[in-house]
Image: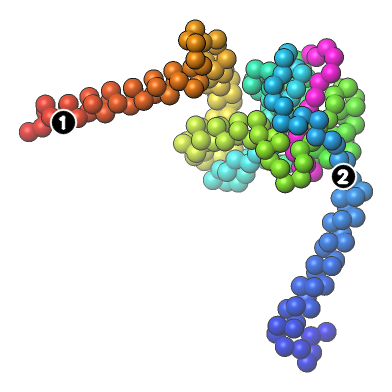
Amino acid sequence: MYRGMSTTQQATSWLSTCSQMDSSRVWDDCESQKCNYTNLLKRNFRAVRPNEKWVTDITSISTRIGWLYLSVIKDLHDAFIVGYQMSRLQGFTLVDRTLDAALKDNTFNGSLLLHSDQGSQYTSDLYKQRLNEYGITPSMSRAGTPLDNAYAESFFDILKTECIYIEKSQTAAEAEKLVDEYIHLMLPSVISMLVTPCPCPISCLTVCLPVGSLCSFLFFRWARYLAIAVFRP
């Protein structure tokens, strides 16, 4: 096939052939299995009651021996994680188990919207069947628009910044323990602080918390300089 052709011509011919074969195969597979849904959430992340709007997503957690995948479902009403599961394998089974975990302890009266991105697990026929079985209305982000699912993405960012990146788990079991402890012990305290009504006329999130953090930083910095001045030999 490549006889009498230069190296550049051979590479160009090979890449062209592979590109045509791959694009055709992927297109056929996607068209036969993919289920698209309308973006019903439309970045309206406010919910007036529990179990009205849920968002879901999957993230990967790196360990010394491989990847651990975390799937969560978050309630937009109070920011609680209503269901989550972890696995060494990323697939529909992980999403299915997460959905079962969320519905095990949460019942909903009326409509429930479940928003996701366009991951292959969420566009599968099996996912569509499960949502129809539970009477859940699906919603999906637009292609290449992660901000449509910003509330799910933000949870992963906070989890990794405050927990995963600090501990640096050696094994999947250690990472699972960290996630369990964060969701069950640390996260409820943070959410409680953020949703507690503030007696101040101005929101604590915009004034009190930043000012308090700044005052604490300045106090400890002043105390450090004072200690250095007093105890310097």
Residue 79 in percent (x, y) is at 64, 21
Please, what is the three-letter code of the amino acid marked with disc 1? Ile
Residue 40 in percent (x, y) is at 81, 30
Q: Farthest top residue? A: 199
Residue 210 in percent (x, y) is at 43, 24
User: Is 124 placed left or right of 183 in the picture?
Assistant: right
Residues shaded magenta: 107-120
Residue shown at 55% from the left, 10% from the top:
197
- The count of marks equals 2
Label ID, residue 34:
2
**How many other residues sit within 10 Å of disc 1, few (<14), some (14-19) or many (≥20)?**
few
Residue shown at 71% from the left, 36% from the top:
148
Is 114 included in the stretch rendered in magenta? yes
Query: Which is nearer the N-term, disc 2 or disc 1?
Result: 2
Label ID, residue 228:
1
| Nearer to the camera, 229 or 39 | 39
